[in-house]
Image (tube, rainbow, N blue to C red):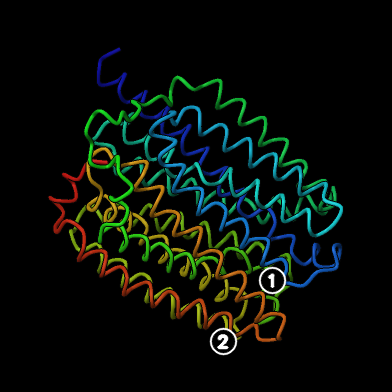
Amino acid sequence: MSRAAIATSNDVRVVSLVGTAHGASHFFQLVLPPLFPVLKDALGVSYTELGLVMAVFFTVSGVAQVAAGFVVDRVGADRVLPAGIALCGLAAVMAGLVPAYGALLGAAVVAGLGNSVFHPADYAILSARVTPTRMARAYSVHSIAGTLGWAAAPVTMIGLAEGLGWRGALSTVGILGLGFAAAVMAMRADLQVPRHRPQDGVPAASWRLLLAGPMIACFLYFFLLSVAQGGTQNFLPTLLPLTQDVTYALAASATTVYLVGSAVGSLAGGVVADMTPHHARIVGAGLAGAGLLTLALGYLVLPLAPLLATVALTGFLTGATTPSRDMLVRAATPKGATGKVFGFVYAGLDLGSVVAPLVIGALLDHGAPRATFAFMAAALLATIASAFLVGGKGTAGSAGERRASV
């Protein structure tokens, strides 16, 4: 086998393994929200209290993710990644066994700790193990795999709950997660990357790097985007029956349509992002369109076909901005700072996800489902402003972004 063929085989193996792990992490993020209507009655709680569960999960994940970036650089992503998968599986089993609402909050803490490791570990592995000329495509596959994980969760959890009950559904996916963690551990050789050593004198070794202007700008962008997306991904099965003439099961399927549209959009967005240096403009156009369509979902009663088309296009436009978003982060990332930077800025996604469940849960409890769509649309529009701020802080031009080492 030629050297080029060996490199291609190695890249495919690494990207497939890391992408599958990323898909699993996103799947576990959405195992609870599709079951909210059932959990509300079974545990005797409100939507606000269920929103608090997601808030705890994302708070723990966001705070721990910053530290996880440093752990990845010191301990090794090959050890940290399977541990995170195992914690997510364990948390799902715990959620399936909870006797009362309080225990569900404990499961959310465990799940948050598990979720915190994925982005710093994944990007450290991809950056070190994938051929540089294929790096952008590797990032694109990574993003798509995560979106497909989100897409699979609603239909999977509802289907399992119909046959096994909500407890059986959570326990089943948790056990499968533990098995997947063991499989990833067995393939650690494909995940090993050089560990960061303080004596190397790399500037990224300091916490001060994370307080630099470009890093704060990136964090703000991720935070606002997550506020906008959190409601769609977590509450669409609950919201659509209240604003559109659809059943709960169809609303769950619409969530999958949204996420599949996002995955397709991410693939298309990767091609566009490689053709232009104007990544902030791509983000602005995509999120502006997604914001208008989000308002339509809340305030226009749509027939089934136009409804699904609107949901799909909203996901497509949002997903199409993802590669340009990552290009903006790459442009602002110093050499040797992969785990720390991606751990920090992706913590913005988690902390932003704390806001959406609490606000939307409160709006639902006060009988204002349409206002939730206005809230999500406003967050999308606010994200546009932060995207241009990130673009101004990062390295200008496509050449500079391609030189940025992650």
Residue 335 is left or right of residue 257, and the answer is left
Vertical order, 363 against 64 (above or below): below
Mark found first going from the N terminus, 2 or 1: 1
Residue 165 is left or right of residue 224, and the answer is right
In the rendered image, residue 52, in percent from the top left (x then y), is placed at 67, 66
Q: Nearer the viewer, residue 327 or 63?
A: 63
Which mark is nearer the camera, 2 or 1?
1
Report which quarter residue 2 is drawn in.
Answer: top left
Tag 2, which secondary structure? loop
Residue 85 is left or right of residue 189, and the answer is right
Residue 159 is left or right of residue 358, and the answer is right
In the rendered image, residue 141, in percent from the top left (x then y), is placed at 41, 43
Q: Nearer the viewer, residue 348 or 271?
A: 348
User: On the rendered image, what quadrant is the N terminus found in?
Assistant: top left
Q: Nearer the viewer, residue 228 or 334?
A: 334
Residue at point 80%, 48% (across, down):
96
Residue annotated with mark 1:
238
Residue at point 61%, 80% (across, down):
303
Report which quarter residue 222 is drawn in.
Answer: bottom left
Q: Nearer the viewer, residue 169 or 343?
A: 343
The circle drawn on residue 300 is: 2
- Near mark 2 (Cα within 10 A), the count class, few <14, some 14-19 or many ≥20, is few
Amino acid on which the number 1 mark rests in the picture:
Thr
User: On the rendered image, what quadrant is the C terminus found in?
Assistant: top left
- Near mark 1 (Cα within 10 A), the count class, few <14, some 14-19 or many ≥20, is many
In the rendered image, residue 127, in percent from the top left (x then y), is placed at 32, 36
Residue at point 35%, 69% (across, down):
286
